[in-house]
Image: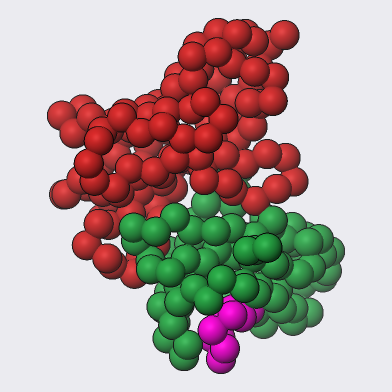
Chain colours: A green, B red
Amino acid sequence: EAQVTQNPRYLITVTGKKLTVTCSQNMNHEYMSWYRQDPGLGLRQIYYSMNVEVTDKGDVPEGYKVSRKEKRNFPLILESPSPNQTSLYFCASSFRPSNQPQHFGDGTRLSIL
Amino acid sequence: AQSVTQLGSHVSVSEGALVLLRCNYSSSVPPYLFWYVQYPNQGLQLLLKYTTGATLVKGINGFEAEFKKSETSFHLTKPSAHMSDAAEYFCAATDPGGGADGLTFGKGTHLIIQP
């Protein structure tokens, strides 16, 4: 089954404790992206990757890092999480960034205390 | 830079009534347009998309949308609402030139179905 898998689905942690949210896709997609969803703001792009070893900032990259060492994986790293990063996060992938619909994971709800 | 505006953060309709969710875009060239649906505790699922060709696009679950360049709109409709349609709906746009920016989303419309 074609899917984008995020882990964990839920996480409560404390300020400053490094965390990683994993994202893996099994569709051989080149393009992967991270979004955060906040009430009243819709989804905003954090980082994206056009292919292995190619990443770039989206609209709200501050406080986040990503890496793309393998085509299927695109982890999101919060080196020193802060409460304003409490949000619902989605990973997405597609064959090409623009005219192909993106496939989304089920989301990761992060709470930073 | 493009933007997407969804009019109405909440829309309430009666079961069996027409559903109309509004989406307007702003960009220098007509973008590719998408509607996604998000059910509680789930990710986003593609309802339909417009890239080129026919301006009336049919999607899943009985939804359709019409691209109107003159009005810079891409409104989502369904003739008869069902209780299972209650969800969050997002309109999104992307650059047809193949840029890497990904999707620009509207802020979402929460559809409420009254019995």
Which residue is pictured at 36% across the width and 33% down the height?
Answer: B57
B91, B78: nearer the viewer: B78
Residue A18 to residue A4: above or below: below
Q: Which quarter of the figure has residue A64?
A: bottom right
Residue B88, position as x, y percentages in the image = 60, 35
Which residue is pictured at 39% across the width and 52% down the height?
Answer: B104
Give the main secondary structure of the magenta stretch: loop
Q: Does the magenta run of residues contain B104?
A: no
Residue A38 in view here: yes
Q: Is residue A105 left or right of residue B66?
A: right
Residue B85 to residue A89: above or below: above
Which residue is pictured at 49% across the width and 14% down the height?
Answer: B79
Q: Which quarter of the figure has residue A97?
A: bottom left
Residue B66, position as x, y percentages in the image = 31, 28
| Residue stretch rendered in magenta on the structure | A65-76
A79, A92: nearer the viewer: A92
Quarter the N terminus of chain B occupies: bottom left
Residue A108, position as x, y percentages in the image = 72, 61
Q: Does the magenta run of residues contain A75?
A: yes
Which residue is pictured at 48% across the width and 27% down the height?
Answer: B63
Residue B8 in view here: no
Residue B90, position as x, y percentages in the image = 50, 40
Quarter the C terminus of chain B occupies: top right
**How many numbered badges does the structure rendering display?**
0
Q: Is residue B97 left or right of residue A58?
A: left
Residue lying furthest front in this view?
A: A1
